[in-house]
Image: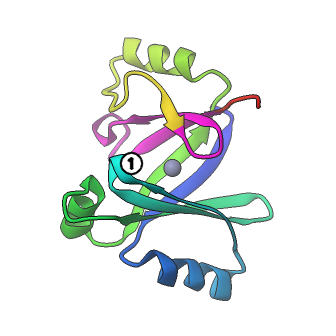
Amino acid sequence: MNHLDHVAFAVLDLDQSIDFYEKNFGFKLEYREKLESQGVELAFLALSNTKIELLAALDEESVLNKFLKKRGPGLHHVCYRVDNINYELSRLRHSGFKLIDTEPRPGAHNTLIAFIHPESTGGVLTELCEYQAI
Ligand code: ZN
């Protein structure tokens, strides 16, 4: 792993949460996208060298909505940046880690991402991301 890429929070109201982080903590909105297939709308906000992701559910059926109902808004996952996500996934799989994504999938910002199950990481949903050359 190289370094922490971002921390993600599950929120009830995306507009309100963006506003909150801009007004109170000085974050700037960098990117916003609806991922219909996953039932979420996400936003990335940044400080000089810090990035957060805000995640809101698009509908009742969204996995994120189930998360929000069970645990309420708050910390959702952490994401570490890696150079070679395929290598890291196979390394973790061979070490017996439970993976949510066995293959990397496209994420925001021209990245490949994969999630590791919190059962294997002490209760912290963990994402890996590799930035692809454009
Ligand atoms: Zn993320």
The percent position of residue 31, horizontal first and vertical second, equals: 64, 61
Q: Residue at x 38, y 48 (%)?
A: 124
Coloring basis for residues: rainbow
**Callout 1: CB less than 8 Å from ligand 1:** no
Q: Relative to residue 47, is residue 130 drawn left or right? A: left
In front: 1, or 72?
72
- In the image, residue 67 lies at what x, y percent? 25, 60
95 over 32 or under it: above or below: above
Q: Which residue sits at x=56%, y=84%?
A: 20
Q: Which residue type carries mark 1? A: Val
The location of residue 110, given as percent across then percent down, is: 65, 38
Identify the residue under disc 1. 124
How many numbered circles are shown?
Answer: 1
Q: Quadrant of the N terminus?
A: top right
Q: Is residue 78 above or below residue 11?
A: above
For the record, the magenta segment spans: 107-130
The residue depicted at 67 percent of the width and 41 percent of the height is: 3
Quadrant in the rendering for residue 43: bottom right
- Asked if residue 111 lies in the magenta stretch, the reply is yes
Q: Give residue 80's position: percent from left, percent from top.
A: 58, 40
Q: Residue at x 37, y 53 (%)?
A: 36
